[in-house]
Image (spheres, grey):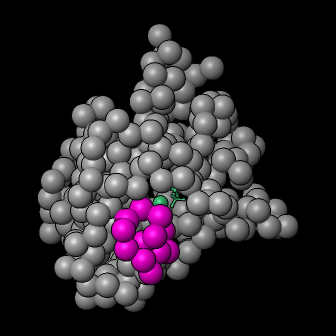
Amino acid sequence: MTIAEPFHIIAHRGASAYAPENTMAAFRLAAEMGIREIETDVGYTRDGAIILFHDNTLDRTTDGTGSPGDYTLAELKELDAGSWGDRPIPDGSHEPPVSWSGDYAGEQLLTLQELLDAFGDQFVYHIEIKRPAPGLVSDVLQALRERDLLESVYMNTINDFDSLLEVRQQEPSVKTAWSPVNLLLGEGDGRHVVQQAADHGISMFVFNSTTLDPALVALAKELGMETRCSGIKNRDQMIEAVEAGCNGMTINWPDWLVECVDDRTK
Ligand code: G3P
Ligand code: CA
């Protein structure tokens, strides 16, 4: 079985199986593992800073509560985002367990600018507009533009197509990645969804492990898009995505994927 070309090994929220997600520790660990691409989630703080945070509330991964958008950056910086690894995963969470060996107590939440300043063009950044808000796409593009990183990014959304159209309008050369989970899980024909993405110049069509379909992977590639998978929770799902022909995936265990690619390209 060959590996698709190009192939993106993307540390999901950093090397998040091994260090607290979306913190400097997780991104640093990804870099130490030799990983060249990371994924992260952006949204505004109450005072308009761009914070890297996945969930709708602070509860699972910090000692805070409520929405990150209800706090100023200074308030969010007071939180401990690195001590939650030994807590049980809440019932109903779709997040896989973590197994940290390091002590990450006191790890802070990060802004997008801090991430970009720390790693520059060492990474390709897959930036998900997690909490769309007026001005957010513009501000993210500006942060990238100021650092000459517009070529090192895929702007990503799950379901939200409008933010990607905004990216296309403001910076047509910036790569876009769309993960239309709801549409693919709905009753319509997935081929039309893939066609819609291609018609609007989307660069990368993103499947979730629950929506992965090798025929749609092939169609997306025929229409000139790259494909990737997300939502990988175990090795079997990782291998399934490789074998479906995806051009890579976001994964909490990037080391597994490095090993898998090495084995298959020997
Ligand atoms: O494209 C979506 C993917 O990168 C995964 O993100 O927010 O579902 O963990 P999330
Ligand atoms: Ca994400």
Q: Residue at x 15, y 69 (%)?
A: 146
Tell me the quadrant of the picture where the N terminus can be found: top right
> Is any atom of residue 10 visible in this view?
no
Q: Residue at x 26, y 84 (%)?
A: 72
Tell me how many marks there are: 0
Q: Residue at x 58, y 22 (%)?
A: 2
Give the side of residue 161 with respect to residue 67, left or right. right
Which percent across, then down, holds residue 18?
39, 40
Give the side of residue 71 with respect to residue 251, left or right. left
Magenta part mainly helix, strand or loop? loop
- Image: 130 above or below 69: above
> Is any atom of residue 83 visible in this view?
yes
Which percent across, then down, holds residue 199?
60, 66
Magenta residue check for 226: no
**Magenta range:** 55-66
Which percent across, then down, holds residue 141?
28, 72
27 or 116, which is in the foreground? 27
171 or 16, which is in the foreground? 16
Q: Quadrant of residue 29?
A: top left
Give the side of residue 183 with respect to residue 52, left or right. right
- Image: 56 above or below 253: below
Task: Kindly give the residue lying farthest to the front in the view shown.
Answer: 87
Task: Kindly give the residue lying farthest to the right in the view shown.
Answer: 187
- Image: 59 above or below 86: below
Which percent across, then down, holds residue 179?
58, 61
Magenta residue check for 57: yes
Q: Residue at x 18, y 50 (%)?
A: 119
